[in-house]
Image: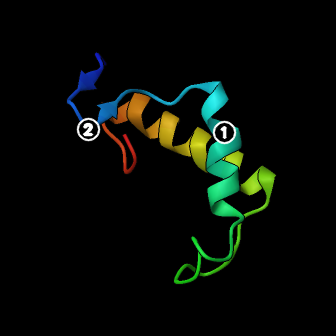
Amino acid sequence: MREIVTPRLKLRQWQEEDKEPFFRLNSDPRVMKFMPKLLSREESDNFVERIKGQFKKDGYSFLL
């Protein structure tokens, strides 16, 4: 997939360095207030891998 860049947004495939900030979001009680639970680092990393796997299989995914 190529990158899509606008003045306010950049869409690209997930990269390894995205896992740390994604985990910080997934483990923040304020961010996850309306979600079922906070995610551990392992759960958050597994979520990223599932997203990447779906994209590879289908050409799209829930979170690009």
Q: Which quadrant of the rendered structure holds the C terminus?
A: top left
Mark 2 vs mark 1, CA separation in Å: 22 Å
Residue closest to the far front: 7
Judging from the image, the colouring scheme is: rainbow
Give residue 39's position: percent from left, percent from top: 72, 64
The amino acid marked with disc number 1 is: Lys
**Residue located 65% across and 44% down the image:** 21
Kindly check if marks 2 and 1 are in contact, taking CB atoms under 8 A apart as contact: no
Residue 35 position in % (x across, y down): 55, 78
Left or right position of 17 against 41:
left
Q: Which residue is mark 1?
A: 19
- In this rendering, the answer to whether 27 lies above or below 61 is below
Q: Residue furthest top?
A: 2
Residue drawn at the location 38% of the way across and 27% of the way down: 12
Quickly name the residue at label 2.
Answer: 8
Q: Is residue 20 left or right of residue 11?
A: right
Which residue: 33% across, 32% down?
11
Determine which quarter of the picture holds residue 49: top right
